[in-house]
Image (cartoon, grey):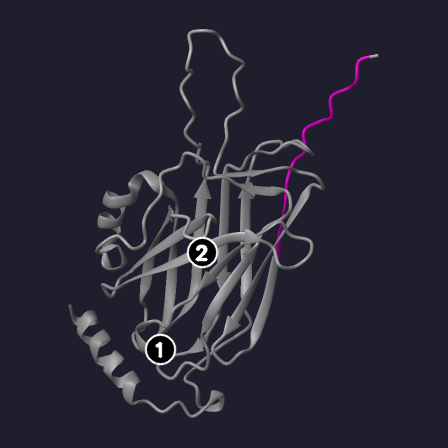
Amino acid sequence: MRKRIYLIGAVAAVSSLAFAGVAQAAITYNPQQLEVKTSAGKLDKKKAGPVNSLFVDVITPYTGSGLPIDKRATNTKVYFPKDYSFSTKGLSQCDPNAAGFNTSTTEAAKAACGASQVGSGSAALVGAVAGVTAVVTAFNGTQPEGRDTILLHSRTTAGTTTVLIGTLKPSNIGGFGKMLDVPVPLLLGGAFAISDFNTTIPKVQLPGKAASSAKKKKKKAKKYYVMAKCSKKKWTFRADSTYDDSSTSTASDQTTCKQKKAKKKKK
């Protein structure tokens, strides 16, 4: 309760603060970082198989404490290798506009959209109150523009909820396949900024259709939310962010994958 009272007071203080510029910032931005961890069995060079675990962590190592904050991200794009593919066919969808979803607790969000959950993670914030963290729950969202979305429901220790909505799109830069485009809203009037945001996507199998006849049919390969090939034994990921002062940053990370041995051709 005390933290929530402090939070309300801090938000009121923000409205009366005149930000005098970067030189006077109490919390200062440092270059963004990206950490990615992947886990998968041996994968084919040309045919995609399941990714057992995908961990993505966008880190902004701010220094200092208290207000003002010199700049905050307004958008982050995470780029995935061309080897990666995402599919949501048959997967339950969570509606971000459902009543109460944007203010719900983690438990309430899971109760409403548990069938569409595709991952989880955590976040850390800097700003008016020190030590605020969040539980992140990832859901497969609706397709308002015909594109897959992921809802990053974030419930903080201060009792507030923010839902970041990422849209999967074709990459707008060369060398990558898909990008997750995530607008970042202003948090409590600018009282906070995200210093760390991570999500882990486990192996999520897509629902399969039951056979329509008694005749035996050839089994179809199982499909998963995240699948990948291993064409070059390494994967490169990238995160680009835009900030409220119009500046930008780029960070990248690389992981390795194991290739299946090529089958010998019969003579």
Q: Residue at x 52, y 71 (%)?
A: 242
Sequence order check, earlier mark of 1 and 2: 2
Judge whether 123 appears above or below 27 on screen: above
Judging depth in this view, the residue of 122 and 182 nearest the camera is 182
Residue 225 spot, x, y in % from top left: 48, 38
Residue behind mark 1: 190
Q: Residues within 10 Å of mark 1 (few under 14, many from 20)?
A: some
Q: Quadrant of the N terminus?
A: bottom left
Towards the viewer: 43 or 15 = 15
Residue position for label 2: 166
Above or below — where is 143 with respect to 190? above
Above or below, 115 against 127 in this view is above
Residue type for callout 1? Gly
Q: Which residues are magenta?
A: 253-266
Q: CA distance from mark 1 to mark 2?
A: 21 Å
Q: Pick the residue in front: 252 or 169.
A: 169
In the image, residue 177 lies at what x, y percent? 62, 49
Q: Residue furthest top?
A: 215
Quadrant the C terminus occupies = top right
Magenta stretch holds residue 264:
yes
Q: Quadrant of residue 4?
A: bottom left
Q: Label 2 sits on what residue type?
A: Gly
Instruction: Say what secondary structure mark 2 lies in.
Output: strand
The residue at 52%/21% (across/down) is: 220
Asked if residue 72 lies left or right of residue 117, the reply is right
Residue 167: say if magenta: no
Q: Is residue 11 above or below residue 92?
A: below
